[in-house]
Amino acid sequence: QIRLVETGGALVQAGGSLTLSCTASGSPGSISSISSMAWYREAPGKQRVLVASLNRDGIPDYLESVKGRFTLSRDKNTLKLQMNNLKPEDTARYCCTALVPWEAPYWGQGTHVTVSS
């Protein structure tokens, strides 16, 4: 079992920056079995979309609209999303997920980001 806890969401003005963190906890064996981690976001009335993902080799991938503004990194059991030049359309609940082979995806509860214009 893996537990994911997201932090860092806040109200920020357009053009501002935030860093979201997702910390995974569980047995050492379960943490090391994570094959990839990612951030999704869900805006009110819209479908959840993949914002950024990091595979086991540490290679990131980004939603087109956040490229150049968001940076994903992982330090041991913490996945961080550095978000710069935030825009009102980035407003959403951001959720972290972790994938383990042969298991259902693990999800955190999410953290809210609100960008005011």
Image (cartoon, rainbow, N blue to C red):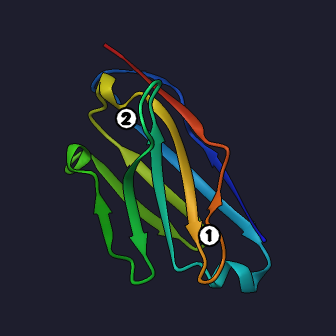
**Looking at the image, which residue sits at the far top?**
117
Is residue 4 left or right of 8 when viewed as pictured? right
Callout 1: SS: loop
Q: How far from the left and from the top, in percent, is residue 74? A: 48, 67
26 w.r.t. 111: above or below:
below
Q: 30 or 78: which is nearer to us? A: 30
Q: 87 or 76: which is nearer to us? A: 87
Is residue 92 left or right of 76 when viewed as pictured? left
1 w.r.t. 3: above or below:
below
Q: How far from the left and from the top, in percent, is residue 38? A: 47, 60
Are there few (<14), some (14-19), or many (20+) residues within 10 Å of tag 1?
A: some
83 w.r.t. 81: above or below:
above
Q: Quadrant of the N terminus?
A: bottom right
**Picture residue at 47% right of the left edge, 53% below the top:** 39
> Residue 99 is drawn in which quadrant?
bottom right
Q: Which mark is residue 17?
A: 2
Q: Which mark is residue 112?
A: none
Are the residues flagged by discs 2 and 1 in contact, CB closer than 8 Å? no
Q: How far from the left and from the top, in percent, is residue 88? A: 32, 22
**Picture residue at 51% right of the left edge, 46% below the top:** 20
First in sequence, mark 2 or 1: give its number: 2
**Picture residue at 63% right of the left edge, 83% below the top:** 102
Disc 2 residue type? Answer: Ser
Q: How far from the left and from the top, in percent, is residue 32? A: 64, 84
Q: Quadrant of the C terminus?
A: top left
> Residue 76 is drawn in which quadrant?
bottom right
Disc 1 residue type? Answer: Asn
Look at mark 1 in the image and give the residue it sits on: 77
Are there few (<14), some (14-19), or many (20+) residues within 10 Å of tag 2?
A: some
| Residues at marks 2 and 1, CA–CA distance in whole angstroms | 23 Å
Callout 2: SS: loop
115 w.r.t. 104: above or below:
above
